[in-house]
Image (tube, rainbow, N blue to C red):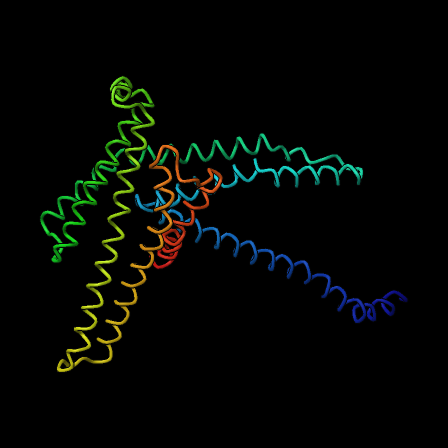
């Protein structure tokens, strides 16, 4: 009967310990489940936003362009002397510490992979732009049916449509000839692939050139409109209407500035590509400059997916 007298005191000492040990794994498991659920939820949101971004042609172009330009930057970075020197120092440090140098630090292989990714993204964009004449047709038709009220904007828009058609048509023919779809003799007869690419880029530069005048004219018309609204003292507007007008004006100015930044960044690079000898922009910087031109637009597209 000694055992029953000895056993009852034990639960009082061991129960708290058993309670603590038994609940800890459950709490850890619950915490791990919450973390996993949070990761899956965040991943689901990102994938849905990416799907929304890629659901239209403009979003696809923005994503592919970003891949194209970032891969180009990484390609030139891994081929640069500072990067190779940095990798060499890492290898020396690894050897001094008695470790084998990392096998993935191979400039040639990483450079070729980024170059391949850059080429793949670029060719995909070329393939998608083969259909670029269709929206240009619609743009031109809409301009003829419903021309801008301002005659200067009307003329500039027509010139931009013509420049873009010229650019897209020459690019399509040159690209298809390079792939063997169109007879290369025809292209060679009129200057060759290089000439066609240069003249195609000149058509694109024409759009950029006229866009500066479009932005100037829009700024003039906007200032006139705002001044006229301020002079109309006799009209009665409530606070909600004023707030809506201010918000609309803010968005209009923001879109205008975004177009100006995009145009200002593209202009020197496009001019560089327009000339046979260029204007001195290093090839290693073209990816960075191109990425900068579309960064604002990419940001707005991504933010827009959260609102959808």
Q: Residue at the spot x=28%, y=40% of the render?
A: 204
**View extreme (left): residue:** 145
Instruction: Tell me the quadrant of the picture where the N terminus can be found.
Output: bottom right
Number of dots carrying numbers: 0
Q: Is residue 70 left or right of residue 178?
A: right
Query: Which quadrant of the view contains residue 34?
Result: bottom right
Against 201, is 258 above or below? below
- Where is residue 189? Give x, y as percent: 25, 19
Against 246, is 115 above or below? above
Pick the residue in front: 263 or 181: 263
Pick the residue in front: 278 or 6: 278
Q: In this view, does 209 lie to the left or right of 296?
A: left
Against 12, is 131 above or below? above
Q: Residue at the spot x=62%, y=57% of the render?
A: 29
Instruction: Tell me the quadrant of the picture where the C terminus can be found.
Output: bottom left
- Where is residue 19? Give x, y as percent: 72, 66
Pick the residue in front: 128 or 183: 183
- Where is residue 298? Give x, y as percent: 38, 51
Query: Which quadrant of the view contains residue 26?
Result: bottom right
Against 147, is 205 above or below? above
Query: Which quadrant of the view contains residue 193?
Result: top left
Q: Is residue 3 left or right of residue 158?
A: right
**View extreme (right): residue:** 2
Q: Residue at the spot x=57%, y=34% of the render?
A: 110
């Amino acid at each position: 009967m000694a055992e029953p007298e000895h056993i009852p005191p034990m639960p009082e000492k061991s129960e708290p310990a058993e309670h603590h040990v038994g609940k800890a794994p459950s709490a850890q498991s619950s915490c791990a489940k919450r973390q996993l659920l949070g990761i899956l939820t965040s991943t689901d949101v990102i994938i849905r936003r990416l799907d929304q971004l890629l659901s239209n042609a403009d979003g696809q172009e923005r994503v592919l362009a970003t891949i194209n330009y970032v891969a180009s930057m990484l390609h030139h970075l891994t081929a640069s002397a500072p990067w190779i020197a940095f990798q060499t120092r890492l290898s020396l440090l690894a050897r001094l510490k008695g470790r084998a140098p990392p096998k993935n630090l191979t400039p040639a292989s990483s450079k070729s992979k980024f170059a391949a990714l850059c080429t793949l993204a670029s060719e995909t964009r070329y393939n998608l732009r083969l259909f670029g004449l269709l929206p240009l047709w619609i743009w031109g038709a809409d301009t003829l049916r419903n021309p801008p009220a301002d005659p200067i904007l009307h003329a500039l828009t027509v010139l931009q449509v013509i420049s873009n058609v010229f650019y897209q048509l020459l690019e399509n023919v040159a690209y298809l000839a390079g792939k063997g779809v169109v007879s290369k003799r025809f292209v060679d007869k009129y200057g060759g692939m290089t000439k066609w690419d240069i003249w195609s880029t000149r058509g694109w530069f024409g759009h950029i050139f006229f866009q500066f005048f479009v932005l100037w004219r829009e700024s003039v018309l906007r200032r006139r409109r705002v001044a006229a609204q301020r002079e109309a003292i006799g009209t009665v507007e409530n606070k909600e209407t004023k707030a809506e007008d201010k918000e609309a004006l803010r968005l209009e100015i923001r879109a205008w500035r975004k177009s100006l930044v995009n145009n200002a960044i593209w202009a020197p690079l496009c001019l560089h590509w327009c000339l046979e000898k260029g204007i001195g922009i290093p090839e290693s910087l073209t990816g960075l400059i191109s990425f900068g031109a579309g960064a604002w637009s990419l940001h707005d597209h991504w933010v827009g997916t959260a609102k959808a």
